[in-house]
Image (spheres, rainbow, N blue to C red):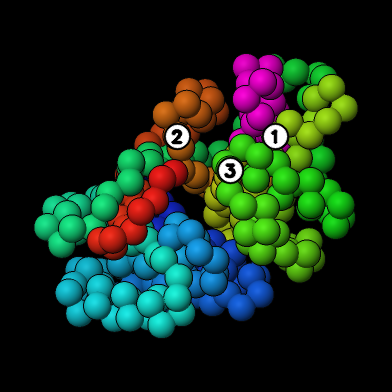
Amino acid sequence: MDSETRTRLEQHIISAHAVRYRTISGGLFEMMSDWARGFSGLPLPVFNIFLPRTPAGLSDDALADTAAFFSSRKVFYAIELVHDRFPEGPDYLNRRRYQSLPPQPAMFVDGIPGQAQLNPDVTIDLVNTVPSLTAFCTMLHSVFDFPLRDMLTLYPVSQLKNDRIQHYLAFLDEQPVGAGTIIFKDGVASVWNMCTIDQYRRRGVATALLHQMLTDAGENGCHLTMLYSTAQAYHIFSNFGFEIYTQRQWFLPPGIDYEE
């Protein structure tokens, strides 16, 4: 990966977070030269994040300020760390007794998808009505086990009119079985929370969903796309040409009892 592509991806990560948090009622996203911070108001720590951008952003003073910020708002939070920008970051946070969650590969692809063998029984719909948005939130609640009320807060009706965010539902056997989100910003796209109901895995749902999202990204002028993978989804993404370029990892402050 060349330095220009890496810079575009790093800038997009911050911009995409800003788009998400600023659509939430009561949410906010702050961007400073050394760090960025997102507040949703929801109780789960991974919905309120602090992102160091420079070494000065990962310091005892910055961590203390962040702890005070979220504590005053009575929510938990997570430090979101990009490994290759902060190679000493995990050890630094571990020494301060932050709890590490499993790292997630950050992957990217430069280009739009070519021909793919798709299951003709899978249909992909763009979420553009309130009932379909409710079905989308219900899908995320079902797969990720997040509280439904939190999903309805994270994905408000106002997003239906935001041309930088598109949500999708995948259907098979005349029922929704998969979902995903894509965010467009400055010629780069990112895929978020792509999922399939367990009993419908290995039936081409994720492949059809990702193909549609990448096609739409290209039509919106975004040939460069990134996402965070899981171990289970890695082979699907690699089949589309995605490559690992770094890892993201969340760290929770001491004293938080949290299970993914």
Q: Tag 1: residue type?
A: Gly
Provide the residue designation for mark 2: 230
Kindly report the distance in space between the C-alpha atoms of the residues bearing marks 3 and 2. 16 Å
Q: Is residue 54 visible?
A: yes
The answer to whether residue 69 is above or below residue 45 is below
Sequence order check, earlier mark of 3 and 2? 3
Q: Is residue 110 left or right of residue 71?
A: right
Kindly report the distance in space between the C-alpha atoms of the residues bearing marks 1 and 2. 16 Å
Q: Residue at x 17, y 74 (%)?
A: 60
Q: Secondary structure at mark 3?
A: loop
Q: Tag 2: residue type?
A: Thr
Q: Are marks 3 and 2 in contact (CB under 8 Å)?
A: no
- Point out the stretch of residues depicted in magenta: 195-215
Q: Nearer the viewer, mark 1 or mark 3?
A: 3
In the rendering, at what x and y percent does residue 179 appear?
69, 40
Provide the residue designation for mark 3: 145
Q: Nearer the viewer, residue 41 or 19?
A: 41
Q: Quadrant of residue 151?
A: bottom right
Q: Residues within 10 Å of mark 1 (few under 14, many from 20)?
A: many
Q: Tag 3: residue type?
A: Asp
Q: Secondary structure at mark 1?
A: strand
Q: Does the magenta-highlighted stretch encompass residue 173?
A: no
The answer to whether residue 55 is above or below residue 84 is below
In the rendering, at what x and y percent does residue 177 appear?
73, 31
Sequence order check, earlier mark of 1 and 3? 3
Provide the residue designation for mark 1: 178
Q: Residue at x 54, y 77 (%)?
A: 28
Q: Residue at x 64, y 31 (%)?
A: 196
Q: Residue at x 25, y 61 (%)?
A: 254
Q: Nearer the viewer, residue 125 or 12?
A: 125
